Image: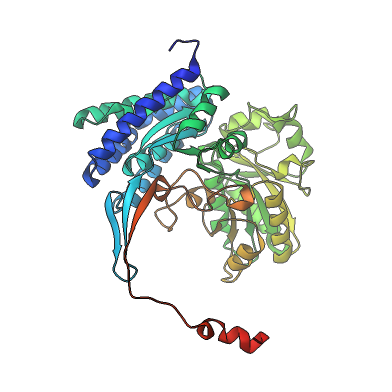
Amino acid sequence: MTAQDPIAEVEAIVASARAAQQRYEADGSQALYDRAAAAAAWAIMEPARNRELAEMAVEVTGLGNVPDKITKNHRKTLGLMRDLQEAQTFGVISDDPATGITEVARAIGVIGAVVPSTNPGATPANNIINALKCGNAIVLSPSPKGMTTCARLIEFIYAEFDKTGLDRNLVQMIPGRGSKDKTQRLLEISDLIVVTGSQNNVKRAYTSGTPALAVGAGNVAVIVDETADLAAAAEKIKASKTFDNATSCSSENAVVIVDAIYDDFVAEMARVGGALITDDTKITGALWVKGHLNPAAIARDADQMIAALGLTDEVPAGTEFIAVETKGIGPDHPLSGEKLSRVLTVYRARDFDDAVSITRDVQLHQGAGHSVGIHTAAADRPLTLANAIPTSRVIVNQAHTFATGGAFNNGMPFSLSMGCGSWGGNSIDDNLHWKHFIQSTKIVREIPPREPKVEDIFADYWAEAGA
């Protein structure tokens, strides 16, 4: 293997990971898998290391902010470890005398994970912990901007592994700047692929020939209806929209406000630092440069973003995010898509039915299958939204960024990768979590027969349609 042979380098890394995984599984126990997961979790949660990783991520990628990355690294990992605490991932995990089936947990093998620059510490840590908990090895392919942070995280994991004799080869990454060729080879020779990031990588994962767990794009639209607690809704949207400078795929990109409370809610947004811009051309002309999002504005602190958009003299001091009125939806209206910035598109709806229609159109344009939200006091409206929108999640009266990927006050699994179902071209419609990193062998025994009579099955149908 030479420096001129990057494909062979990837193959060697995966081979060493596979050998380590086979030893890990052969010597496996629940205690071993739990210890390995805890080692990886503490590697990112230990406060000094957490801060170093957060500072490095912001410095190298230019995306997000340090305090929020520290919070994300801590809470996402702590929540995941809570979810994993009672999870059985080794040996017999179920034994049902009624069905005669005993289920035995089995590892998948080598996980190949492609991770984004937006969360270069938290996302790989989440994947590593899940992989180790289920008896797997993992090889990471970080984005070029996230490479140094990911490498530092792995150094911290190795330091924890060395304390208890765990094999370093269980967790590896493709060294050097990422390339499509090296990532493609990882996709082809892993046993399972996990992809979070660009939709180009998602498509490559699903066509690689390897079983894949890849997630869709976010473009969250949130309805505020006439029954909502407007002050609480504004606070939650502001907290969510500004967290880590809107790097999350779960950050609100549009708010759809029912006409009856439009002015009142705009006032509440102003109270929490949302400055309303009524001429959307002021935003589109600066947020997009030659058809691409302006790097000086995306995922930046408020003052930097406001300066990049040329709004310093137009918005009040202390502005935390920009709310921009618009009407259009679709390819010719970029504000209707994901913006990766503290810019929130505002739509005015005639009534709740119109709000649902607008939200549906936004999702069909971009973000289908990911998630939508609603702030309401009406108990029936979340179900209406769930039946009307091509979405996997309806988040009710919560700060969307914190709720979608799991929170301590809701029942969603903690994750940084949200499946979007067939709507988003994905194989899963739930949050990526440990159950996706494990498979099982079923021992099947005879039981007393349960064969029904034909009339027991078809009696109702015959009565309705005739035999």
In the rendered image, residue 176, in percent from the top left (x then y), is placed at 47, 17
Number of marks? 0
Q: Residue furthest left?
A: 164
The structure residue drawn at horizontal position 24% and vertical position 31%, both measured from the top left corner, is 166
Task: Give the camera-side residue of 37 and 19.
Answer: 19
Evaluate whether residue 348 shows in this view.
yes
In the rendered image, residue 456, in percent from the top left (x then y), is placed at 50, 84
In the rendered image, residue 327, in percent from the top left (x then y), is placed at 78, 49
The structure residue drawn at horizontal position 50% and vertical position 53%, both measured from the top left corner, is 430
Give above or below for 410 relative to 183.
below
The structure residue drawn at horizontal position 63% and vertical position 52%, both measured from the top left corner, is 423
Colouring of the image: rainbow
Which quarter of the rendered picture does the C terminus lie within?
Answer: bottom right
Q: Is residue 222 left or right of residue 259?
A: left
In the rendered image, residue 63, in percent from the top left (x then y), is placed at 54, 30
Evaluate whether residue 48 shows in this view.
no
Task: Give the camera-side residue of 16 and 216.
Answer: 16
Task: Give the camera-side residue of 138 and 355.
Answer: 138
The structure residue drawn at horizontal position 24% and vertical position 47%, both measured from the top left corner, is 30
Which quarter of the rendered picture does the N terminus lie within?
Answer: top left
Give above or below for 97 relative to 333.
below
